[in-house]
Image (cartoon, rainbow, N blue to C red):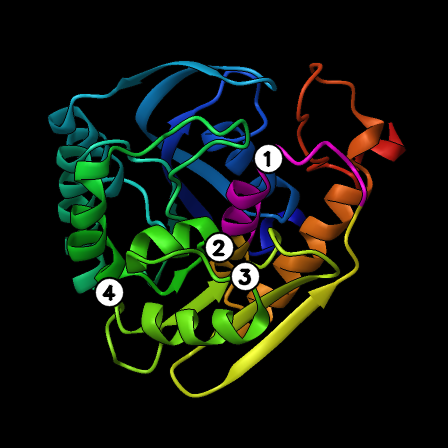
Amino acid sequence: MSSSARPAPPNALSVAGIDPSGGAGIFADLKAFSALGAYGTGVVAALTAQNTRGVTGVHPVPPAFVREQLDTLFADVRIHAAKVGMLGTAPIAVAVAEGLAEPIAAGGLAHLVVDPVMVAKSGDALLGREAIATLIDAVLPLATVLTPNLPEAGVLLDQRPPDNLHEMQRAAERLRRLLRDDGRRFVLLKGGHLSGDATDLLFDGERMIELSAPRVQTRNTHGTGCTLSASIAALLAHGAEPVEAIRRAKAYLTEALRQADRLQVGSGHGPVHHFHAWWHRV
């Protein structure tokens, strides 16, 4: 097939923060998009001063400018799927919700993945307490897939984090009620904070699917949540059904973790290897 006859890659969008070390946020999302064959775009919601050891500063982008970025992008570029990561403040969450609601309602944006980023790998807070209610009320109803880890699930549900599989099942059921009930909404509750295999639960309102993978022993886990949610968005942009997109995204992340020690980035929690399938060719 000639290059002119090949279909164009789909366009994916990340709405998130900037991590200068490249392990998380928009920079990580763009790598995941590219590795999975989607053209990446980004709307900056926050700037951070951050490395593999911690976050030393956060500078939110003015909400009006976040909205302007979204409006300007959607006026020109067709976005097939998007993900939302770090938002930081309630006014930014409102701006993002309003900026995404119109293209979703118009049918131009088919899928939205919401990664409710609240705490960095280092333990630093990335979402103000006042923004949590806004995230729940304004952003989550727009989501096709919600991807909290266990501490984030606890915050969203105002309870202690689940600490076993049974509690994860009950939490997934409650989280699903925060989404629209139109049959196309999924909660992926990530169980990486528990011991043993990395077992996540996928719940669509009816089916509770366990997704397990062997735990990878590495300290280089910076940006795993960002990478997983971006990978799901990239595969949804390609037209994959949500369950298949989530399975493939988890497999991609697992291999990125296995290959993470090939990188030498910083002295703390380094990034996963987004281009593990490509850079061995160089």
Task: Determine if the magenta segment contains residue 262.
Answer: no
**Residue 23 vs residue 49: left or right?**
right
Precedes in sequence: disc 4 or disc 1:
1
**Residue 92 vs residue 23: left or right?**
left
Precedes in sequence: disc 2 or disc 1:
1
Precedes in sequence: disc 3 or disc 2:
2
Residue assigned mark 1: 31
- Amino acid type at circle 3 is Asp
In the picture, the disc for residue 163 is 3
Q: Secondary structure at mark 1?
A: helix
Q: Secondary structure at mark 2?
A: helix
Q: Are marks 4 and 2 in contact (CB under 8 Å)?
A: no
Q: Secondary structure at mark 4?
A: loop
Q: Secondary structure at mark 3?
A: loop
- The answer to whether residue 215 of the structure is visible from this angle is yes
Q: Residues within 10 Å of mark 2 (few under 14, many from 20)?
A: many
- Amino acid type at circle 4 is Gly
Q: Nearer the viewer, residue 196 or 204?
A: 196
Q: Nearer the viewer, residue 253 or 116?
A: 116
**Is residue 1 shown above or below 96?**
below
Which residue corresponds to the image point at 68% horizontal and 25% vertical from the top-left?
270
Q: Which residues are magenta?
A: 217-231
- Quadrant where the C terminus is found in the figure: top right
Residue assigned mark 4: 107
In the picture, the disc for residue 150 is 2
Q: Are marks 4 and 3 in contact (CB under 8 Å)?
A: no
The Cα atoms of the two marked residues, 4 and 1, are separated by 26 Å
Precedes in sequence: disc 3 or disc 1:
1
